Image: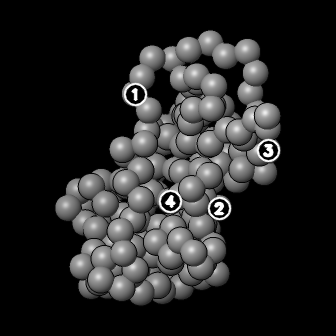
Amino acid sequence: MKKLHLAAGNDDFRQSQKYIQIKGGFVYATNSHVFVKFPLNEVFGENGPFNQDSEFYILASNWKQVGFDKALKFTKDSEFLTAYGKKDTVLGLIKMMDAETFKKEIGNYPPIDSIIPTTELVEITKISFNPKLLKDITDCLDSERYSFEFRGENKIIMIKALDSEVVAGIMPVMPLK
């Protein structure tokens, strides 16, 4: 029941960001302004259809359109992912793209793990970011409490849901000079 589509891109210039990535035990989405990183089990459940070795791509607009953001259970059959709601009613079916096809037809997915900051936390005196982007992240993470980590002015602001292992990032608004 994650609104992953809220963190994905929707412009034609960055085709790869229109997709949700399933890779290495995590689910990623980004639009260059924000990113989210979920452990597989937080999106697909403890006995979900993917494992650490899975790598698939789902068009984020399909995620929303088919109702996957309301799903309670998922099954996978080859390149198709089916979502189920209450009483095991089928919400919809999405054709996924495997890693080889994605790379050939779309290109490379942004390497989100490489931009997650690991430097020391620092105190900052001012902060500026787009509130709509923050709302998209909090709606996507769907938690009641968050921590915010700052590593300096004009650096990615890390957002962590306190009740899960989900991490997200938001780019600050660059100051006008």
**Element under disc 2:** helix
Q: Say which label, 1 or 3, has the lower sequence index.
A: 1
User: Quadrant of the rendered structure where residue 170 is?
Assistant: top right
For disc 4, the marked residue is 29
Name which residue type carries label 3. Answer: Pro
- Badge 3 or badge 4: first in the primary sequence: 4
Measured as percent of width and height from the top left, residue 84 is found at: 51, 76
Label 4: how many Cα within 10 Å (few below 14, some 14–19, many 20+)? many
Q: Which residue bears the numbered disc 2? A: 6
Instruction: State the residue at coordinates (76%, 21%).
Output: 126
Q: Earlier in the sequence, mark 3 or mark 2?
A: 2
Gap in angstroms between the C-alphas marked 1 and 3? 24 Å
Would you say the residues marked 4 and 1 are in contact, meaning their CB atoms lie under 8 Å apart? no
Q: Residue at x 64, y 81 (%)?
A: 65
Q: For the residue carrying disc 3, how many other residues have a C-alpha within 10 Å: few (<14), some (14-19), or many (20+)?
A: few
Q: Which residue is mark 1?
A: 118
At label 2, which amino acid type do we have?
Leu
Please give the residue where the numbered disc 3 appears in the rendered image: 131
**Is there any visible trace of residue 67 in the rendered image?**
no
Q: Secondary structure at mark 4?
A: strand
The local secondary structure at tag 1 comes to: loop
